[in-house]
Amino acid sequence: RGAVIDHKVHIKCFESDKALQQGLDAFLAVHRPRLGLVSARAPLISNLTVWGNIALIRQYHENLSWHTAKSLAEGLLSRLGMAAIAQKRYSALTPEERFGAMLLRAAMVRNAVLVLDRPLSLVPHLRDGRYFIEVIGKLDDLIAEAHVFDYSWHKERYGVADDAEN
């Protein structure tokens, strides 16, 4: 239950850290096979380049060659206007670049169910959640659906009305 921002993005807001964690854990358990997680709990691998982090999913799950996986990752980075970060590593990224790389890595799971775990904490200077919705929209063909898990006091930042169900 929660608010639907567009046809694929669902916002789930919680009153406490404990409630959020319980809701998130239950959701993750059900969707694990197609899960694409964007969370501080699942950071990029620091000794890999951005393209390497993104390509790793398809290399592992589909045995894609290094060259094919790299081309795919670079094309997706271009789609988000982030081609310039392909060779960078975690420590050299801005919060938006880090989020974009984590989102692309998560979207590499076939027919992914994306889960954004408290994305406003990943890019804290944003005034609202429209940025996340816009970036997800650019990957519409890669994902089945997206679920944002955050706190109830951020509802307005996502454009969720106070009377929306949690």
Image (cartoon, rainbow, N blue to C red):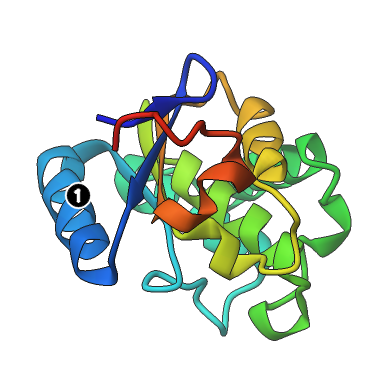
Q: On the rendered structure, is 43 left or right of 50? A: left
Secondary structure under tag 1 reads helix
Residue 110 at least partly seen: no
Residue at 18 percent across and 44 percent down: it is 27
> Compared with residue 104, is residue 119 higher up or lower down, i.e. above or below?
below
Residue at 74 percent across and 59 percent down: it is 126
Q: Residues within 10 Å of mark 1 (few under 14, many from 20)?
A: some
> Compared with residue 142, is residue 157 higher up or lower down, i.e. above or below?
below
Residue at 69 percent across and 85 percent down: it is 91
Residue 78: x and y, percent? Answer: 81, 41
Q: Quadrant of the N terminus?
A: top left
Quarter of the image where one finds residue 101 = bottom right
Of residues 26 and 49, the one drawn nearer to the viewer in this rendering: 26
Residue at 74 percent across and 38 percent down: it is 75
Residue 109: x and y, percent? Answer: 38, 39
> Compared with residue 71, is residue 83 higher up or lower down, i.e. above or below?
below
Residue 133 at least partly seen: yes
Give the residue pinned by disc 1.
Answer: 28
> Compared with residue 34, is residue 119 higher up or lower down, i.e. above or below?
below
Of residues 155 and 21, the one drawn nearer to the viewer in this rendering: 155
